[in-house]
Image (cartoon, helix red, strand yellow):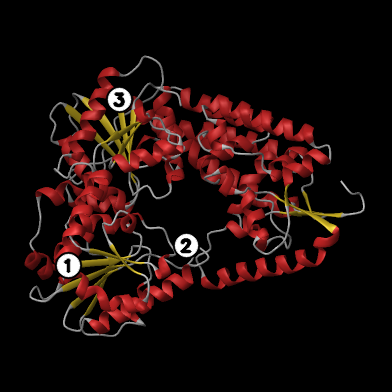
Amino acid sequence: MDAHRNIALIESSFFDFQISHPALLLIQRAYERLLCRRLSKIARNTIIYVDTPIMRERLAQKNISAQLFQDFLAEKEFSQYFKRATLLIDKISTELGFDTEHVYKGVNCWLVLAQHFKLYFLIPFLKQFDIMKKVVHDPPSTVYTTTRCRGLGSIASLSSQPARYLEPSLFSSLRSGLHSAVKERIALRRQLSRFSLSSSEKIPSSGTTLFYHLQIKQEATQFLPIIKHALSQEHLRTLVLCTGTGAQEILLKEHIPFVTLNKYFSLQQEQDISSFHQKLIDDFQEIKKHPLMIDGLNVMPALAPLIEQRIRRDYSLILRMICSLDRLYQEEQVTGLILGNNHNPLERAAVLLGRAKKIPSIQVQHGVVAQACVYADLLSEKMAVFGEESKRILEKEGLTSSRLVVTGKPEYDSWATSPLSKPEACEKLGLDPLKRVIAIGTQPLLGDNISSPHTFSFFLFAINRIIQENADAEILIKLHPRDQLSYYREIIHSSNVHIHQSVPIKDVLFACDIFITLNSTTALEALMMKKPVIIINKDGMEKNSYVDARAALEIRSLDDTKKIAGWLENKKVRDSLEEHAQKFIERNLYKMDGNSSGRIIQLMERMLHHRAKKPFLL
C-alpha cells in the first residue's frame, strides 16, 4: 500500500435503511449525493474502502473506485482480528446449531473493529437506537443486508444472528443464565383459569396438544381454518396461545378458547430473572469503561445509557417468555407446535425450547415467497408451503427438500367451500351488481425502495386514468393494511369510486370483474378466483412473476389504460390468460380443494407418530 495515500473507510448501513417517511428519504438521498461529491474530490489521493459489495457497486455507478474493507484489514496486519472474529462466529454458530456459511457471508468490518475493542455485543444495538440522533458521525451499525440480522429482540432467546456478536464472556454468562432459567423446575404449581369466551369451558384432557401463537389479526385470520379443523378432531387436544388484542377479538368472535402467556408466570420466576439481570448489568459496568472510537469520537457515553435500558427491558421480557413457555409446556403437556413464523422472540423461543423437549414443530408459510431470506433461518422442523414454486425458491435458498411440505394455503379453504355470488358480494360492499366492477389493490409504496415515490406517482396517475375511462363502471379501491387512506382521498374525487381498507379481500374478489394491482399476493388470489389480472408496472422496470408466466397483463405506460376494454373483450386474450393462470395457480397454490388445513394437521400427526428420541437440530 502506498504510504503517501490517505485511507477512507465508508460504513454503508445508513444507505440500506428502509425509510418510509418521504422527508427522511430525501435526507438519505441528499446524504448519499454529499458523500459521493466528497469522495470524488479526494479519490485521486485516497484509497476508499467499503464494507459491502453492494456499496462498492453503488459507488462504481458514480465512477468512484472502491475496495472491500477486508483487503484493508489484511494489508494493515489486522489478520489476527479477522481470524478471531471468524473463530468466534463459528464457535457460537456451532453451539446454537447455525449454518455459518448460510447465515454469515463474509466478515463485517465493524464486527472486526468491535472485536478489537472487545465490544461485540454493541454492534446489533446501534441500528435499533437511531444513533444518528445522538452522534453526528456515521453509526457503526451492522450491515443487515449481508448478515440478515433480525435485531435486538431475539438476542436473549439464543436464536437469531445478533447472538453471534456477543463478547465471549458475556455470551457465556447469558447462555448459562438462560439455560438455568429454562431448566429450573417450578415446585409449586396451580391450575390457572383460561381466558376464553366461555370461562367455564375446559379444554379436553385427552389426546394431543397442538400449540399456536397468534399475535395480530392477520395471523388469526390465516390460522382460523387450521384451528377449526384441529378442534373438529376428537382425538386431538388443541391449545391456542394468543398474545395480541386484535387476534383475541377474532377468536372471541369465533367462540374459540385461548390462553395468554402471563397466566404461566410466577413470582419465583420474577425473582430469579431479577437476580440474573443484576449480573448482566454488573458485567456491563466493566465493559462500558472501554472506549468505542468512531472518527476520533468516543461514542460509548452516548450508547451506554441506551444499552443498559435495553438490557433491563428486553432481556427481562424474553426471559419471562422462556420461563412462562417452559411452565406452559409442562402444565399443558404440549407435544406439537404449529406456528405462523419464527421471526419474533416468542415464537423463536417456543421452537427452540420445544426442540430441547423433543417437541416437533411446523411453521406455516404466511405470504408469497418473494424474498426467500425471510424464511432462510427456519427453526421449525418442517415448513408447510403453499405450492411447488415456494418449495423451489426455498430449496434454492438452502433449505432441504425434506423440511418443506406442500399443503396449499389454509386461508383459502373457505373460499373453495363457501363461495359468494357477485350480487351477494356487491350487496355487502354497497356496489351495483349490474355494472362492471373494477377492483384496484394498493401497496404501501412510499419508502419500500429508492424508486417508490416514482412508482407511487405513476400508480396514482394510472388509477385516475382508469377512473376517467370507465365512468360507467364501479371502481373499488382496496387499500393495503399498511397503506394511507389520505393519499387517495385527497386525489380521487368521483361518485363511482369506493375506497375500503378493512373489508376482506375475499369479498372484493368475489364482487369484481377485473383486478388491477402491482406485484402483490392479492394478484395470486384474484387468479385463483378466475379474475383477469392487470399489473401496473411503469416501463416494465420491476420483474413480475405473474406477467412472466403470461398469467396477467401489464400496464407499462398511461396510454395502456385505454387498452383494458379491448383486452377483456378479446376472447383469444382471455382464453390465454385463463390457461396460463391455471398453470400458475397449480405451481403456487397446490390443490384448491378446501383441505389445506387438513393436510397440515395430518403432517403434524405423522411427525408425532414418527418423532425421534433426540431433539431436532438444524
> Residue 337: x, y in percent?
32, 32
**How packed is label 1: few (under 14 Cα within 10 Å), some, or many (20 or more)?**
many
- Work out which residue is located at the far front of the displayed protein and give it: 572
Q: Which residue in the structure is indicated by mark 3?
A: 335
Q: Which residue is mark 2?
A: 448
User: Which residue is rendered at x = 27% and y = 48% of the image?
Assistant: 220
Which numbered marker is on residue 20? none
Q: In the picture shown, does residue 85 fall above or below 563? A: above
- Neighbourhood count class around disc 3 (C-alpha, 10 Å): few under 14, some 14–19, many 20 upward: many
The location of residue 132, given as percent across then percent down, is 66, 61
- Earlier in the chain: of badge 1 and badge 3, it is 3
Residue type at numbered disc 3: Thr
Residue at the location (20% across, 49% down)? 412
Relative vertical location of residue 532 with respect to residue 256 in this rendering, above or below: below
Is residue 413 shown to the viewer in this render?
A: yes
The answer to which quarter of the image holds residue 531 is bottom left
Q: Is residue 457 left or right of residue 597?
A: right
Secondary structure beneath dot 2 equals: loop
**Residue type pointed to by label 2:** Asp
Q: Which residue is mark 1?
A: 512
Q: Is residue 512 left or right of residue 534?
A: left
